[in-house]
Image (cartoon, helix red, strand yellow):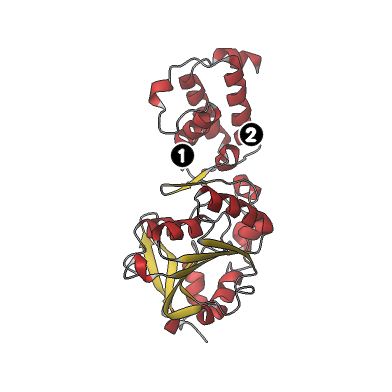
């Protein structure tokens, strides 16, 4: 290791080395980046306490020995332990929003980010039409926070069964100064919400099938299994949401649920539901929408 530390002197040296080692190790990139170069740049800039959008001016800067040791250490964690970069940096981004994350929550990644960045148009008349909204399976609180930023007049409930996840969400809600508008609720889906009704319910629930869980890359095994696994067909939680959502929606209320690659499974399980599937830039048919009147009683 000492030889390596002495040979790699500049940020450019370490960036090249990191990209080579990431590709050689066959790392999986699915927690904020989709390639070795972007992930290496993100991790190195964080380790060196440099602005994440200012790589070029520092490429030929020589690192101190302590900096080289710190960089080597964090690269080893990424390569040998397959720890997702978001956990190493303690941050994740959804659109323009930054969130604190650690191993108590899955790393935020949701097609809802694009929808919310566009005010949920055209599925809602206007952001002002939402007065109450619910984020089921909130995890880090990212979607609840983004809803609060878009729906300025709304009060948001954010629900999760995990007390650990809610602790992370509480930190993020405080970071965005939204404690007065975002209520965190420990609940098994709707169980602790009483008769509360909402104009909009969104959920990015666990939806990974048993087969897919068994084949997950090592990076995903650092995430809480309860936030991913959803039974043999990945629909255990989705079924419960569809069974219970109607009585928690206002007249003309909207339910939107993200199911990843499970569109065919959902359609096969619910052939009589008039599901509307949303196409996003990142993927087609990953979120379905139902009006309250379309939901089963």
Q: Which residue position holds label 2?
A: 77
- Judge the density around disc 2: few (<14), some (14-19), many (≥20) Cα neighbours within 10 Å: some
Tell me: residue 256, above or below residue 225.
below
- Judge the density around disc 1: few (<14), some (14-19), many (≥20) Cα neighbours within 10 Å: some
Task: Measuring from the top left, give residue 113's x and y in whole percent.
Answer: 43, 56
Closer to us: 13 or 23:
13
173 relative position to 278: left or right:
right
Check if mark 1's residue and mark 2's residue have beta carbons within 8 Å: no
Q: Which residue position holds label 1?
A: 35
Closer to us: 226 or 197:
197
Q: Is residue 256 in view from this perspective?
A: no
Tell me: residue 103, above or below residue 226.
above
Tell me: residue 263, above or below residue 99.
below
271 relative position to 212: left or right:
left
Q: Residue furthest bottom?
A: 297
Q: CA distance from mark 1 to mark 2?
A: 17 Å
Which residue is depicted at the point 50% across and 72% down?
Answer: 266
Q: Is residue 98 in view from this perspective?
A: yes
Task: Measuring from the top left, give residue 297's x and y in whole percent.
Answer: 52, 87
Corner quadrant of residue 70: top right
Q: Which one is closest to the eye, mark 1 or mark 2? A: 2
Task: Measuring from the top left, give residue 215's x and y in whole percent.
Answer: 61, 53
Indicate the secondary structure of the residue bearing disc 1.
loop
Task: Measuring from the top left, give residue 81's x and y in whole percent.
Answer: 66, 37
Closer to us: 99 or 170:
170
Q: Which mark is residue 259?
A: none
Tell me: residue 255, above or below residue 89.
below
Indicate the secondary structure of the residue bearing disc 2.
helix
Closer to us: 5 or 162:
162
Which part of the image, by quadrant, shows the N terminus?
Answer: top right
211 relative position to 247: left or right:
right
């Amino acid at each position: 290791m000492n030889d390596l530390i002495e040979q790699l002197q500049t940020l450019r040296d370490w960036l090249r080395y990191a990209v080579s080692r990431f590709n050689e190790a066959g790392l999986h990139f699915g927690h904020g980046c989709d390639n070795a170069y972007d992930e290496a740049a993100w991790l190195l800039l964080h380790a060196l306490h440099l602005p994440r959008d200012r790589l070029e001016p520092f490429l030929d800067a020589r690192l101190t020995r302590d900096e080289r040791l710190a960089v080597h250490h964090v690269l080893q964690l990424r390569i040998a332990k397959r720890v997702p970069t978001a956990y190493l940096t303690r941050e994740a981004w959804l659109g323009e929003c930054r969130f604190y994350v650690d191993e108590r929550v899955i790393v935020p990644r949701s097609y809802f980010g694009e929808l919310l960045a566009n005010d949920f148009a055209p599925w809602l008349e206007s952001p002002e039409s939402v007065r109450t909204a619910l984020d089921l399976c909130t995890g880090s609180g990212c979607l609840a926070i983004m809803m609060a930023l878009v729906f300025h007049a709304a009060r948001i409930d954010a629900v999760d069964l995990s007390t650990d996840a809610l602790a992370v969400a509480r930190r993020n809600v405080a970071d965005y100064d939204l404690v007065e508008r975002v209520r965190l609720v420990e609940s098994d889906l709707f169980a602790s919400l009483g008769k509360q009704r909402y104009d909009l319910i969104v959920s990015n629930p666990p939806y990974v099938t048993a087969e897919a869980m068994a084949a997950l890359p090592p990076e995903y095994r650092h995430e809480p299994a309860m936030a991913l696994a959803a039974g043999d067909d990945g629909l255990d939680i989705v079924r419960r949401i569809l069974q219970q959502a109607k009585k928690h929606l206002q007249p003309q209320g909207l339910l939107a649920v993200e199911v990843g690659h499970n569109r065919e499974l959902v359609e096969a399980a619910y052939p009589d539901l008039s599901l509307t599937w949303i196409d996003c830039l990142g993927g087609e048919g990953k979120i379905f929408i139902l009006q309250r009147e379309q939901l089963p009683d």
